[in-house]
């Protein structure tokens, strides 16, 4: 393996630009050291923009700026109209994306390559040499590290501490992944429709990403579009996470998992791409021990409850595949009768005390017509909302019962909130329509 180019100054900068063929030689023999990077974070520089770019003088200007910020490293690569510029050596952890620089996921340390596209891409997509070089860099790193573009490439704004549009709202995940996949496979990318930028257009991409981030953050640490488990959850309509994931050990093997409303997803570390479903593993019976049981226990724990296999309500929820309980059980009195209930990811179960074995589902009261049933339904809804930390308003905009187009879990996992968004970039907020969309999005995905 070849040694890297020398650096100079602080933070250490290679400060050299490569042509495509020089870059291809460089990446082919690059020595990443003991641990190779496993992600690439895409950025735009915003400033300097394309007309301000002066090659090495701009690189030195950024080095000065980073030194003033007290940074000991910088992004690794800048793609500019005049070439592929090298800053921080790729064998070292860079500073460019906050929590996206490096971290520990499921017990494994990782770091990312920071790739800056010179320019400002909130309104227009990168094109010409900048985009040509960006595709060369992303596809060659994907091939060299043997990590598919969808798993490798994330955006700066994917990380919750970013608070910016970087690499620009006009740059969308499907566009980048599609273009880089085509480059990796030597095929022609799908042509972009003329007129509006991208599918979905930037304003919708912004809203979608904010909704995903908000929804996944209600009961988890957030949405990571490059994670196989999150891609699987979306593609298979698993609903929102009911809690954070973690790892468990079984037979000297480490498994990662995260509970979702419809099922718990798990995978053997480090086979992140081979996502499995807990209900498939269990095949309809609750095992006394082993991996399946450990995952079942962990899913309840992560969702705010304790799994009791001997409880009728838990046996009922398991066979009806209602997901984990998202709160501990409780009770209330209505017209002289004591009711016990527990909120599960997809429905609330209830019973009359002490008829523990006669378990009923709240959603079966959806079209109740008898007065007593309606009163019970409303009391259960109030209790369910309260357990979720919010308040039930029978005439609220999200509570037309049954909710049109939504067959399960007609209650939120958390209190309602409006999204904060930059008004210039999100034409539809904060109108009721988009807030409605937010809630419907959260609920229908469950
Ligand atoms: Zn950035």
Image (spheres, rainbow, N blue to C red):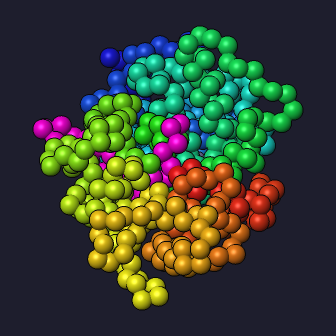
Residue 244, magenta (yes or no): yes
Looking at the image, residue 185 lies above or below residue 403: above
Tell me where the magenta segment starts and ends, as one range. Answer: 235-261
Does residue 6 appear to the left or right of 377 in the view shown? Answer: left
Q: Position of residue 246 (x, y in %)?
A: 30, 51
Depth check: 403 or 302 in front?
403
Does residue 55 appear to the left or right of 270 in the view shown? Answer: right
Q: Quadrant of residue 431?
A: bottom right
Q: Quadrant of residue 348?
A: bottom left
**Can residue 338 be seen from the camera position used here?**
yes
- Image quadrant where one finds the N terminus: top left
Looking at the image, residue 164 lies above or below residue 34: below
Residue drawn at x 59%, y 78% is: 371
**Can residue 136 be seen from the camera position used here?**
no
Does residue 309 appear to the left or right of 92 in the view shown? Answer: left
Residue drawn at x 23%, y 48% is: 286
Q: Position of residue 233 (x, y in %)?
A: 48, 42
Looking at the image, residue 324 lies above or below residue 370: above
Q: How many marks?
A: 0
Q: Quadrant of residue 162?
A: bottom right
Q: Position of residue 433 (x, y in %)?
A: 77, 60
Residue 176, magenta (yes or no): no
Looking at the image, residue 180 lies above or below residue 337: above
Depth check: 90 or 222 in front?
222
Depth check: 249 or 70 in front?
249
Depth check: 174 or 404 in front?
404
Residue drawn at x 58%, y 64% is: 366
Residue drawn at x 52%, y 68% is: 414
**Name of the residue lying farthest toward the bottom:** 336
């Amino acid at each position: 393996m070849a040694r890297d180019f020398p650096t100079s100054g602080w933070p250490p900068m290679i400060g050299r630009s490569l042509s495509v063929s020089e870059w291809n030689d460089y990446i082919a023999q690059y020595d990443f050291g003991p641990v190779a990077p496993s992600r690439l974070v895409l950025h735009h520089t915003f400033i300097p923009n394309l007309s301000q770019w002066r090659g090495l003088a701009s690189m030195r200007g950024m080095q000065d700026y980073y030194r003033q910020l007290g940074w000991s490293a910088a992004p690794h690569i800048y793609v500019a109209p005049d070439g592929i510029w090298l800053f921080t050596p790729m064998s070292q952890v860079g500073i460019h994306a906050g929590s996206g620089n490096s971290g520990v996921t499921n017990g494994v340390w990782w770091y990312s390559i920071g790739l800056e596209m010179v320019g400002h891409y909130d309104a227009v997509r990168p094109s010409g040499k900048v985009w040509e070089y960006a595709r060369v860099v992303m596809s060659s790193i994907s091939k060299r590290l043997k990590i598919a573009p969808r798993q490798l490439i994330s955006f700066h704004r994917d990380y919750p501490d970013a608070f910016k549009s970087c690499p620009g709202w006009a740059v969308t995940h499907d566009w980048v992944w599609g273009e880089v996949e085509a480059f990796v496979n030597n095929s022609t990318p799908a042509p972009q429709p003329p007129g509006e930028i991208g599918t979905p257009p930037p304003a919708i991409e912004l809203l979608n990403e904010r909704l995903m981030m908000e929804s996944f953050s209600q009961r988890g640490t957030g949405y990571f579009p490059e994670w196989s488990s999150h891609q699987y959850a979306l593609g298979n309509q698993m609903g929102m996470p009911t809690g954070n994931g973690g790892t468990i050990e079984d037979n000297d093997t480490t498994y990662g998992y995260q509970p979702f409303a419809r099922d718990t997803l798990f995978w053997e570390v480090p086979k992140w791409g081979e996502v499995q479903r807990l209900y498939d593993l269990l095949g309809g019976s609750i095992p006394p021990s082993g991996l399946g049981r450990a995952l079942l226990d962990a899913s309840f724990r992560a969702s705010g409850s304790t799994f009791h296999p001997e409880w009728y309500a838990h046996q009922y929820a398991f066979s009806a595949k209602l997901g984990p309980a998202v709160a501990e059980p409780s009770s209330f009195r209505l017209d002289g009768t004591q009711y016990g209930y527990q909120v599960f990811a997809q429905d609330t179960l209830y019973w009359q005390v002490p008829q523990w074995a006669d378990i009923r589902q709240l959603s079966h009261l959806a079209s109740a017509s008898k007065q007593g049933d309606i009163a019970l339904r409303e009391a259960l809804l109030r209790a369910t909302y309260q357990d979720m930390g919010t308040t039930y308003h029978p005439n609220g905009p999200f509570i037309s019962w049954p909710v049109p187009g939504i067959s399960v879990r007609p209650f939120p996992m958390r209190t309602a909130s409006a999204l904060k968004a930059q008004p210039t970039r999100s034409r539809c907020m904060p109108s009721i329509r988009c807030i409605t969309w937010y809630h419907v999005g959260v609920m229908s995905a469950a």
